[in-house]
Amino acid sequence: MAALPVQAGDIAGRELADKAAELRPGLKVLFASGYFEGALVSKGALETDVQFIAKPYRMKALAQKVEEVLGS
């Protein structure tokens, strides 16, 4: 698999996800942020159809969300 030509801090999460999807069509992405999901959507940082989990989260919640994302 080809490595992405970016380093941490060089690119926003959405842009990184888009670039990764170019390399791996059908890639499932789960965004995590300390910002409230509604605020991110209203700022245009996330589309309404992306998978998202708000920080802080418990490991059980993360496991459930990952299972949900992979099952979709």
Image (tube, helix red, strand yellow):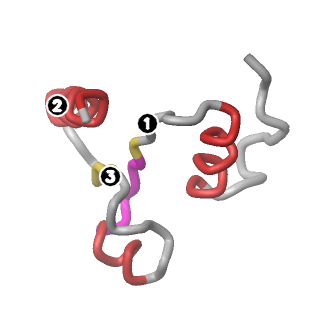
Q: Residue at x 29, y 74 (%)?
A: 38
Residue 64: which numbered mark, if any?
A: 2
Of the numbered discs 1 and 3, the one sitting upstream in the chain is 1
Q: Which residue does the numbered mark 1 point to in the structure image?
A: 28
**Helix or strand or loop: what does disc 2 sit on?**
helix
Q: What is the C-alpha distance between the residues marked 3 and 2?
A: 12 Å
The residue mark sitting in front, 2 or 1, is 1
C-alpha distance separating marks 1 and 3: 11 Å
Tell me if residue 47 comes above or below residue 19 in the rendering: below
- Residue type of the residue flagged with mark 1: Lys
Q: Position of residue 50 (x, y in %)?
A: 37, 56
Q: Position of residue 13 (x, y in %)?
A: 58, 53
Q: Position of residue 57 (x, y in %)?
A: 23, 43
Query: In the shown orientation, is residue 40 left or right of residue 15?
Result: left
The residue pinned by badge 3 equals 52
Among the two numbered marks 2 and 1 on one chain, the one whose residue lies closer to the N terminus: 1
Part of the protein shown in magenta: 31-36
Q: Which residue type carries mark 3?
A: Phe
Residue 49 is inside the magenta segment: no
Residue closest to the eye, 47 or 59: 47
34 falls in the magenta region: yes
Left-right relation of 65 to 70: left
Given this view, does label 1 or label 3 mark the residue nearer the observer? 1
Which residue sits furthest front?
25
Depth check: give the residue in front, 34 or 72.
Answer: 72
- Dot 2 amino acid type: Gln
State how far apart marks 2 and 1 are (Cα).
Answer: 15 Å
Q: Secondary structure at mark 1?
A: loop
Above or below, 40 against 56 in this view is below
Q: Point out residue 52 in the picture as x, y percentages from the top left corner.
A: 32, 52
